[in-house]
């Protein structure tokens, strides 16, 4: 991976991680469009450490409050604290993606990166998001979160193991179906992603350092640059999206996803894009 490629992909990662349009799909497509080798699932996971660092910074007060309350609840001192409860719900909600990520790791790094799968996921889940945004009651806030809802959010997040679904898009869609407001669903999707994304990213770092990474090798200099850029851009996107959701709908993102999915399918059918370049490079 070259430095220019790292700059472009780092910016793309930061721009798309928190919007419901799938960062992994964009990294996959942008690289193919420029004729670059697929950066691989390892690159995606490591650069996501940068975007999650943006979450940690933006929500630092909330996260610190949740952590301290959760630790206090272990000793029985803060059992009824809503922040402690939120900590437990984030842990419970992180289990599905952790288990499924390990079970389907090989498919995630190869088969699921087929551009036809990516395009289909973009289109299909955009329609589901549109439906959820139309029928969702949008009356519940995070204080109303229950254990069953937390598990539901977790399984929705796990769908993002397929490029094109979108981690934030999947969890936000689940939140809308469950009656949560747009902003509440988005905030919880950001918080829920922290354990899973950081665990995945550092696991990929470990595998790269030990030589166990599947697919393309890691170019550490460019990858670290991309991670830093993803952090800076992602921080800006978080602030913008939460302001936007106070008054805006998800319709623009739905339209964008459908158009992008159709464009990818058209370019694959025309032979411009190779749908299997990622699956054959590992």
Image (cartoon, rainbow, N blue to C red):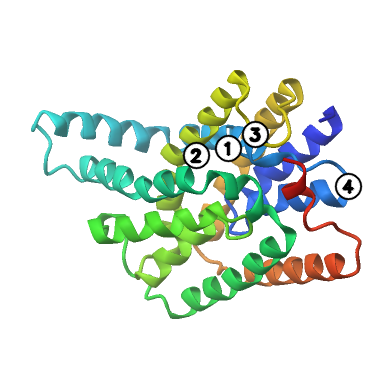
**Residue 265: percent from the left, percent from the top?**
79, 69
Q: Which of marks 2 and 3 is in front?
A: 2
Identify the secondary structure beneath mark 2.
helix
**Residue 101: percent from the left, percent from the top?**
48, 46
Residue named by callout 3: 232
Q: Which of marks 4 and 1 is nearer the N terminus?
A: 4
Q: Which of marks 4 and 1 is in front?
A: 4
- Among the 4 quarters of the image, the one containing residue 209: top right
| Residue drawn at the location 77% of the way across and 53% of the way down | 29
Residue named by callout 4: 34
Quadrant holding the C terminus: top right
Q: How crowded is mark 1: few (under 14 residues within 10 Å), some or many (20 or more)?
A: many
Q: Are discs 2 and 3 less than 8 Å apart at CB?
A: no
Q: Distance between the residues labelled 3 and 1?
A: 8 Å
Q: Earlier in the sequence, mark 1 or mark 2?
A: 1
Q: Which of 120 and 225 is in front in this view?
A: 120
Residue named by callout 1: 51
**Residue 22: percent from the left, percent from the top?**
62, 55
Q: How far apart are marks 3 and 4 (CA)?
A: 23 Å
Q: How far apart are marks 4 and 1 (CA)?
A: 23 Å
Q: How crowded is mark 4: few (under 14 residues within 10 Å), some or many (20 or more)?
A: few
Identify the secondary structure beneath mark 3.
helix
Q: Which of marks 3 and 4 is in front?
A: 4
**Residue 11: percent from the left, percent from the top?**
73, 40
- Horizontal side of 132 relative to 144 (left or right) equals right
Q: Do we see residue 146 in this rendering?
A: no
Residue 46's place in the image compared with 138, above or below, is above
Identify the secondary structure beneath mark 4.
loop
Q: Nearer the viewer, residue 111 or 151?
A: 111
Q: Are discs 3 and 4 less than 8 Å apart at CB?
A: no
Q: Are discs 1 and 2 less than 8 Å apart at CB?
A: yes
């Amino acid at each position: 991976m070259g430095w220019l490629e790292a700059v472009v992909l780092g910016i793309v990662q930061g721009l798309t991680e928190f919007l419901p349009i799938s960062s992994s799909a964009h990294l996959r497509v942008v690289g193919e469009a420029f004729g670059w080798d697929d950066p691989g699932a390892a690159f995606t996971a490591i650069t996501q450490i940068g975007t999650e660092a943006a979450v940690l910074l933006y929500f630092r007060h909330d996260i610190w409050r949740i952590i301290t309350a959760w630790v206090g609840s272990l000793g029985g001192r803060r059992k009824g604290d809503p922040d402690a409860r939120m900590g437990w719900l984030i842990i419970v909600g992180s289990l599905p993606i952790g288990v499924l990520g390990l079970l389907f790791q090989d498919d995630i790094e190869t088969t699921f990166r087929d551009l036809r799968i990516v395009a289909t996921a973009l289109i299909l889940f955009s329609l589901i998001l549109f439906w959820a945004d139309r029928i969702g009651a949008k009356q519940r806030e995070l204080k109303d979160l229950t254990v069953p809802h937390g598990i539901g959010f977790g399984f929705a997040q796990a769908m993002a193991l397929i490029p094109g679904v979108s981690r934030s898009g999947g969890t936000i869609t689940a939140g809308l179906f469950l009656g949560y407001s747009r902003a509440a669903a988005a905030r919880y999707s950001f918080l829920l992603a922290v354990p899973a994304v950081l665990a995945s990213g550092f696991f990929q770092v470990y595998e790269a350092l030990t030589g166990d990474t599947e697919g393309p090798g890691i170019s550490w200099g460019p990858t670290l640059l991309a991670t830093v850029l993803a952090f800076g851009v992602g921080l800006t996107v978080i602030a913008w999206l939460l302001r936007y959701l106070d008054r805006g709908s998800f319709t623009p993102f739905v339209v964008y996803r459908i158009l992008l999915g159709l464009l990818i399918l058209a370019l694959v059918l025309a032979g411009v894009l190779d749908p299997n370049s990622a699956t054959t490079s590992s």
